Amino acid sequence: MRKPLIVGNWKMNGSLDDNKALLDGFKAGIGNVKVAEVAVCAPYIYIPDVAEQLTGTPIAWGGQNMSIEAKGAFTGEISTAMLLDFSCKYVIIGHSERRTLYGEDDALVAQKFAVAHKAGLIPILCIGETLDEREKAVTEEVVARQIKAVIDEVGIASLGDGVIAYEPVWAIGTGKTASPDQAQDVHAFIRGQLAAHDKAVADKIRIQYGGSMNAGNAKELLAMQDIDGGLIGGASLKVEDFLAICTAAG
Ligand code: PEP
């Protein structure tokens, strides 16, 4: 039985005051979340403050990105050791905004997965097709390629220690959600790809859905057999919406 995992991706949003109000709200409501594991991935600079506010609560935290380098002359970068200094549990890897806006390719994403895993962080590997790719009916080829890059780099067992987030790029921040059946089809395909290497890993790994999941559509999506949680952008910045998604997961 896979425990659902709901992760808020704050992206480049927040302020000390806004974060406090948000986290106060989450802490007040988290007692109603009976089944799901919950985490928030904050902008780097707020992670120490988030850690302070969430220590001792059931809510974990993480980074939205990281460097493959350990230390040195890499201006603007953050290492896994720095994330671990502030007790991050998760790190998002290969978000489509990183891939599209910052040129992260499959090879770099796979290296990031390897470095995060080796350091003891739980990588949340984002994969998914663009609108153009969906219209060309190459969704399965795209996600298969993205998964293969990581398996080739770290091996199937290490991939199994992470989390996959299937995020159709056309659904991220657009208000267009994949239908439960559309999402389930791709999730089942992803699990099948993993099962071809190792059935136990395929059965164990959590595959989140991400892309305009909200309080209104979460229950239906999360009810699908191969959807094991959500990576939530916009709705993770609203107390009631995020908590509603967390409780919809159980
Ligand atoms: C995301 O940033 O991973 C995401 C799914 O965003 P949104 O929920 O806003 O579509």
Image (cartoon, rainbow, N blue to C red):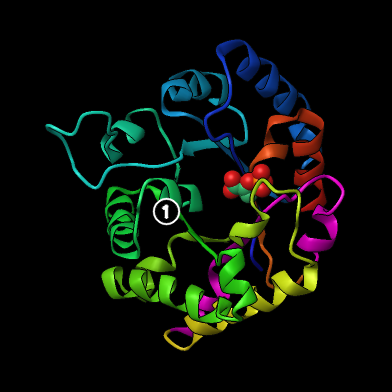
Q: Which residue is mark 1?
A: 99
Residue 198 at x, y percent in the picture: 44, 84
Question: In the displayed structure, does residue 211 sit left or right of residue 41?
Answer: right
Residue extending farthest to the top is 17
Q: Nearer the viewer, residue 61 or 17?
A: 17
Residue 67: tell me if it is visible.
yes
Magenta-colored span: 198-223
Magenta run includes residue 220: yes
Q: Is residue 50 left or right of residue 70?
A: right
Q: Is residue 124 above or below residue 72?
A: below
Give me the residue at 29% from left, 75% from top.
Answer: 152
Which amino acid, by three-letter code, is at mark 1? Arg
How dense is the environment of label 1, judged by Cα within 10 Å: few (below 14), some, or many (20 and up)? some
Asked which quadrant contains residue 160, the reply is bottom left
Residue found at x 42% / y 76%: 145
Which residue corresponds to the image point at 64% horizontal and 58% vertical from the top-left?
Answer: 170
Task: Say which residue appears at 84% left-offset and 54% top-offset.
Answer: 217
Q: Is residue 36 magenta?
A: no
- Which one is in front, 95 or 131? 131
Q: Is residue 60 above or below residue 110?
A: above
Picture layout, residue 153 above or below residue 61: below
